[in-house]
């Protein structure tokens, strides 16, 4: 019998059972199993410490009491009591082998992981740009982080609904229509619609200064749109369509496919119910003519209002977001909602979630888990906002083009003799992956410095390094004339050398990295794991020759190579990256 996929939760269960038997569970004992410092073992249970402290007992005695009852774990682990009352567990080589034999493909890894969130539905709201505008570098993070989160949740067994909450409603459309009716250039629209819409909007904005009759005219266009005027609605629809088509080109390059594009406009006719329910439940009040929500229990929001309907009666970002939360529960049956935006929207979402909690409780609607996933800014190496040479914003399309060009130069330098089409294809993957991974390898809460040199480097925690690690493992199979889809590893014996054991121990911890990244909604934890795995693989490969004559040794080393390959590829795909056969 092999260990289950997630060895840490297996230990957790075993310790809970033991604690129940000993009567410790009733008194609140929690095993607290974590990945250990490799010098101490594979996993460490720290629970005796907190328990003993609370119960005024000797922690070593508590831990010893548990250790004495763990005979059932002896088949798979060696363990010992350590320090002030930790229990350290080390997986035995035979158990490592059995685990590696059991989880040999992306699919097997996935079915191992799928228990965590199976039966749950998660709505992930990400990318969500405003229409009629180009996507620029600031839009990169939400798209890349959001997609990785979708894949992590799917891997854990959740049904994931990808929802692009477009900013497609608001006063700017009055000015845009005003400008469109005067200055639209149909030829320009046919070649690059978004570029042209941006130009028209700028003209419209410039021609309608505050207090001018032109602004009144733009407002009339907006009111006509809001009242369903056929011409203006058709224009607005056109703006949305061309914007989405342009966004889709970026999404294709990033491997993103949305299930829905339910933008702000979609919720605009659903806000009356929101106004009514929040007023009826007395969660909202009227302040200076606006409908607002205060949160008296909160230090800031007891005085800072959440304005959910403006004094002139118009809806706003808050009204549509309240309607969005309700829709996601009523129509998608969401168990969890994740919204990915930059940190500057933190107050909005905090107020939104507090309001939703009170409102859903009052109406007895089912409350899903609500997560605002924030991220920091992307800056240049000077720490300032990233700009083009002439000070403009960097368009996402241009950024991805440049990444591919730079990758092409590198690939050509390394393989001058391979055909251009092949070098182009490799460069497409390396270029885009580098940009994605530069973002994903960082803790999303930090600002990150955009550096071409760093992200394209073959050294360090970068996409080229990881993609190259994948191709290096693949080349072992290629050179030996073996198909990595059917590795001859059935006869493998348990890992033996220090490097083999070290690599096997790392492979078995893939579930922990996935779980940590999923539960915290922080993909960089998985990135870091993959980087460390690639390092352990290099150490192993440098020390232990794989293609040797002894069939048992050869099979067990091929097993390690193969599982490294599968784990690296699975992990990179989970982050939204594509992988390569050669580089
Ligand atoms: N359109 C917004 C922006 O560009 C992001 C929307 C995020 N989602 C939401 N439900 N508010 O900043």
Image (spheres, grey):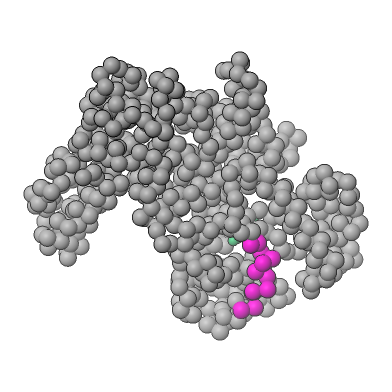
**Left or right, 47 with reference to 358:** left
From the viewer's side, name the closer residue of 359 and 132: 132
Residue at image x 45%, y 29%? Answer: 470
Q: Which span is picked out in magenta?
A: 262-273
Report x, y in % for residue 325.
55, 68
When asked about the image quadrant of residue 485, the answer is top left
Tell me if residue 49 can be seen. Answer: yes
Q: Residue at x 61, y 56 (%)?
A: 164
Query: Main SS of the magenta segment?
Result: helix
Q: Quadrant of residue 78?
A: top left
Residue furthest bottom as drawn? 280
Q: For this rendering, which residue is in front, 294 or 270?
A: 270
> Which quadrant of the picture is home to ligand 1?
bottom right
Queried whether the magenta region covers residue 530, the answer comes back as: no
Q: In this picture, is 299 found above or below 549?
A: below
- List x then y, in percent, for residue 161: 53, 58
Residue 272 in the magenta stretch? The answer is: yes
Looking at this view, is 59 or 546 the one in front? 546
How many numbered discs? 0
Please, is residue 419 above or below residue 30 in the view? above
Q: Quadrant of the N terminus?
A: top left
Nearest the viewer among 20 and 475 is 475
Tell me which residue sits at (52%, 39%) in the image: 577
Residue 381 visible in the displayed image: no
């Amino acid at each position: 019998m092999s260990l289950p996929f997630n060895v840490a939760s297996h230990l957790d269960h075993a310790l809970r059972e033991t604690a129940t038997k000993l009567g410790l569970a009733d008194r609140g004992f929690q095993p607290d199993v974590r990945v250990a410092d490799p010098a101490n073992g594979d996993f460490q249970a720290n629970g005796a410490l907190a328990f003993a402290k609370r119960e005024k007992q000797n922690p070593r005695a508590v831990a010893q009491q548990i250790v004495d009852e763990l005979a059932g774990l002896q088949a798979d682990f060696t363990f010992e009591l350590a320090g002030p009352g930790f229990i350290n567990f080390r997986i035995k080589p035979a158990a490592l082998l059995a685990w590696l034999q059991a989880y040999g493909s992306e699919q097997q890894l996935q079915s191992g992981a799928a228990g965590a969130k199976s039966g749950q539905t998660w709505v992930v709201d990400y990318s969500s740009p405003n229409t009629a505008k180009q996507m620029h570098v600031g839009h990169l993070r939400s798209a890349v982080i959001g997609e990785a989160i979708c894949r992590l949740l799917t891997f854990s067994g959740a049904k994931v609904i990808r929802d692009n909450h477009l900013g497609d409603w608001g006063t700017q459309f009055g000015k845009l229509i005003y400008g469109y009716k005067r200055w639209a250039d149909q030829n320009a629209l046919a070649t690059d619609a978004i570029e042209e819409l941006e130009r028209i909007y700028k003209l419209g904005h410039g021609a309608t200064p505050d207090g001018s009759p032109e602004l009144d005219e733009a407002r009339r266009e907006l009111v006509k749109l809001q009242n369903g005027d056929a011409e203006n609605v058709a224009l607005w629809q056109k703006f949305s369509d061309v914007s989405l088509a342009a966004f889709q080109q970026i999404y294709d390059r990033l491997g993103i496919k949305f299930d829905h594009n339910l933008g702000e406009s979609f919720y605009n006719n659903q806000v009356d119910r929101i106004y009514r329910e929040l007023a009826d439940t007395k969660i909202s009040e009227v302040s200076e003519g606006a409908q607002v929500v205060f949160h008296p229990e909160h230090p800031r929001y007891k005085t800072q209002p959440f304005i959910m309907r403006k004094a002139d009666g118009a809806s706003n970002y808050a009204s549509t977001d309240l309607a969005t939360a309700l829709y996601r529960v009523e129509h998608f049956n969401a168990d969890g909602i994740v919204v990915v935006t930059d940190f500057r929207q933190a107050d909005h979402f905090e107020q939104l979630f507090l309001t939703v909690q009170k409102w859903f409780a009052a109406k007895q609607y089912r409350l899903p888990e609500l997560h605002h996933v924030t991220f920091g800014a992307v800056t240049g190496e000077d720490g300032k906002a990233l700009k083009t040479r002439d000070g403009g914003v960097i368009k996402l399309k241009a950024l991805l083009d440049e990444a591919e060009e730079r990758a092409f130069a590198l690939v050509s330098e390394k393989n001058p003799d391979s055909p251009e089409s092949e070098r182009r294809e490799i460069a497409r993957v390396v270029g885009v992956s580098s940009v994605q991974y530069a973002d994903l390898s960082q803790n999303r809460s930090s600002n990150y410095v955009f550096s071409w040199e760093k992200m394209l480097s073959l050294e360090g925690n970068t996409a080229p390094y990881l993609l190259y690690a994948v191709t290096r493992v693949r080349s072992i199979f290629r050179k030996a004339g073996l198909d990595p889809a059917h590795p001859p590893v059935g006869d493998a014996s348990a890992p033996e050398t220090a490097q083999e054991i070290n690599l096997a121990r790392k492979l078995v911890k893939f579930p922990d990295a996935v779980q940590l990244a999923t539960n915290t909604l922080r993909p960089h934890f998985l990135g870091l794991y993959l980087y460390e795995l690639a390092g352990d693989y290099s150490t192993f490969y440098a020390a232990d020759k794989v293609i040797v004559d002894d069939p048992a040794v050869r099979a067990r080393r091929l097993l390690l190579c193969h599982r490294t390959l599968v784990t690296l590829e699975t992990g990179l795909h989970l982050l939204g990256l594509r992988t390569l056969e050669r580089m």
